[in-house]
Image: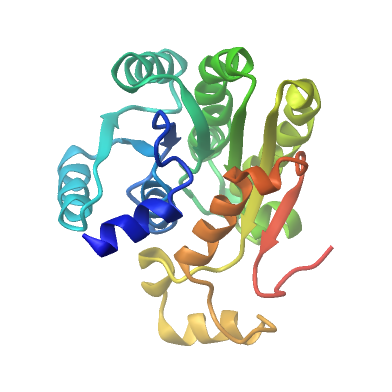
Amino acid sequence: MEQAVKQDTQNPQAGTAQKVALVTGGTGGIGTAICEKLANLGYKVTTTYRNEEKAKAWQKEMNDKGLDVAIYKCDVADHEDSERVVKQIAEEFGPVSVLVNNAGITRDSTFRKMTHEQWRDVISCDLDSVFNVTRPIIDAMLEQGHGRVINISSINGQKGQFGQANYSAAKAGMHGFTKALAQEVARKGITVNTISPGYIATEMVMAVPEEVRGKIIAQIPMGRLGKPEEIAHVVAFLVSDGASFITGANIAANGGHYME
């Protein structure tokens, strides 16, 4: 009981109507950490998925941690499907006040060998999705006079990366979107920001051969990979009232791997 009281005093939404957060692609490594952080801050967290079996197993893991996260099958690369899910979330829980555009894929290839399908798949999922999901949410944020849009980009959107012309273009485009939208909605109490993680110790990165991973780490001044929780902490800061004067920014979280 004492622990529950302590948690309530740390919950910025204790005693108020629960705010709704949508994290696209929340079942991945970084997405999971973001969902957990927002849920522990008192948000009603919702997320999108494409693989139903994986998503239901993930939801059970979250439930086992005492976190109630709603999952919705959605292809965020599809505009109509994105609109449908946003509408469904609003009907079930209320309007989204925090949106984290986190969904993304890679289809790596040198540009000379890259197919149109590889280009289109990444641009559609990583960049078009930002429009598809944000567009039906922004009006409700404007009506509320408050909102947080956070776009999860990448270090490779800043510096480029061999074999990732598609991914680097999409992730750089996310921040261009951030800067433009931030100017349009700033006076309405809405902030729009980008986070650009470096190499994070997710399942995907840890699957890279140890020798290759070692070479990557050797290029990072801090001498280690980042943790998904460290990206989630940046999200928590940006959704807070204390970050209400920060908008149109790109926050690099890469251990000093790339600075500009």
Q: Residue at x 64, y 20 (%)?
A: 145
Q: Residue at x 31, y 56 (%)?
A: 5
Given the current orientation, which residue lies at the most extreme right position?
260
Q: Residue at x 35, y 20 (%)?
A: 85
- Image colouring: rainbow
User: Does residue 210 sit above or below 46 in this rendering?
Assistant: below
Towards the viewer: 6 or 37? 6
Towards the viewer: 17 or 95? 17
Image quarter where the N terminus lies is bottom left
The reply to whether residue 111 is in sight is no
Q: Residue at x 42, y 85 (%)?
A: 210
Towards the viewer: 119 or 173? 173
Displayed quadrant of residue 255 = bottom right
Percent across and percent down for residue 58 are: 21, 50
Towards the viewer: 38 or 161? 38
User: Does residue 13 sit above or below 224 in this rendering?
Assistant: above
- Left or right: residue 100 versus residue 194 is left
State the count of labels: 0
Percent across and percent down for residue 46 are: 34, 35
Displayed quadrant of residue 253 = bottom right
Percent across and percent down for residue 184 are: 78, 21
User: Does residue 208 sit above or below 118 in this rendering?
Assistant: below
Percent across and percent down for residue 225 are: 53, 77
- Left or right: residue 125 versus residue 173 is left
Displayed quadrant of residue 84 = top left
Image quarter where the C terminus lies is bottom right
The reply to whether residue 173 is in sight is yes
